[in-house]
Image (cartoon, rainbow, N blue to C red):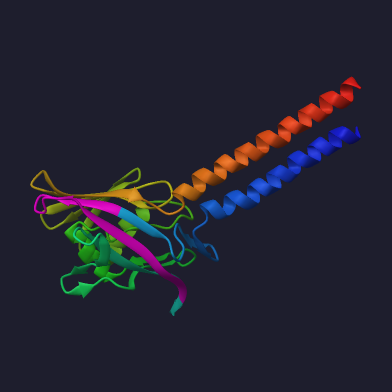
Amino acid sequence: MKLKKYILGNILFFFLVFSGCIIPVFAGFKLGDTSVPVDEGDFIEYDFDDNVVPEPLKIKVEVVSIFQYYEIINALVVNINVSKLKSNTKTYEVLIVDSIKYQNQTCLVYNKTHQLFRYDQYMNNLLMQGYGGYYIIPDDHVDVNIVKGFIEGYTAWSANVIGNTITIDIANNQTILTYNEQGILIKQEVISNNEIISTLTLIKQPNNVVLIVSITVIIAVAAGVILIGIIIYKYKFKT
């Protein structure tokens, strides 16, 4: 009986360790019941390809700061840097679009309780140029309809949602955004006259490597605990 309790105690201990390890892996940033799938210091990388530039361009989105801001109500604000990779030096430089330097620019403002959600107007410039702009959506839970609500409430555009994909009609163009289950933009296509003129494709998102390593370690620990428990149990039972 004591041995069974010992084994059960080990299994319970494992699950406590599992919970403590796995939650930080999936966590982004949370303020009350308001959260986003990134944290300060995270970065996202994309390939950008259009029918003008002969070679794909790499775009890097860095999360500079996430903070609480009071504008009638408290809101969570995400500020980002957007950079492009210089092919000759292999270093990133801050992206400039329409004379706007995308350094420490506000990406979004969000409060779940009060249903406040909007992207900064400068993100609309990036969106129209095919550079994304709407890089993240809340992960408390992931629902692309929140982008549709923003479009209808803050712009003159129209939008349609199917699954995790939203199609935005902007003048004579269509911009198609697809998000993953973590709330990260994984693809943007800009279509004009039924022809794809640019594509932005995710190549790296936060926590990918950490997630794989953490799950592998946790599974290995679980297998070890269970195996040792079985061996001890069989040994004691035989003797």
Using the rendered image of the protein, determine whether residue 77 is visible from the camera's viewpoint.
no
Using the rendered image of the protein, determine whether residue 128 is visible from the camera's viewpoint.
yes
Closer-to-camera residue (113/77):
77
Closer-to-camera residue (191/56):
56
Q: Position of residue 4 (x, y in %)?
A: 85, 33
195 left or right of 44 in image: left
43 left or right of 83 in image: right
Q: Position of residue 142 (x, y in %)?
A: 43, 51
User: Looking at the figure, which quarter contains the C terminus?
Assistant: top right
Q: Is residue 59 magenta?
A: yes
User: Looking at the figure, which quarter contains the N terminus?
Assistant: top right
- Residue at 45%, 57% in the rendered image: 37
Q: Position of residue 187 (x, y in %)?
A: 28, 48
> For the view shown, which residue lies furthest in the top direction?
238
Closer-to-camera residue (36/162):
36
Relative vertical location of residue 111 with respect to residue 28 in this rendering, above or below: below
199 left or right of 146 in image: left
Q: Is residue 164 magenta?
A: no
- Residue at 30%, 70% in the rendered image: 120
Q: Position of residue 29 (x, y in %)?
A: 50, 62
Magenta stretch prevailing secondary structure: strand
* Number of numbered discs visible in the structure rendering: 0
Q: Which residues are magenta?
A: 46-68
Q: Quadrant of residue 57?
A: bottom left
Relative vertical location of residue 128 with respect to residue 234 in this rendering, above or below: below
- Residue at 58%, 49% in the rendered image: 22
- Residue at 33%, 61% in the rendered image: 61
207 left or right of 170 in image: right
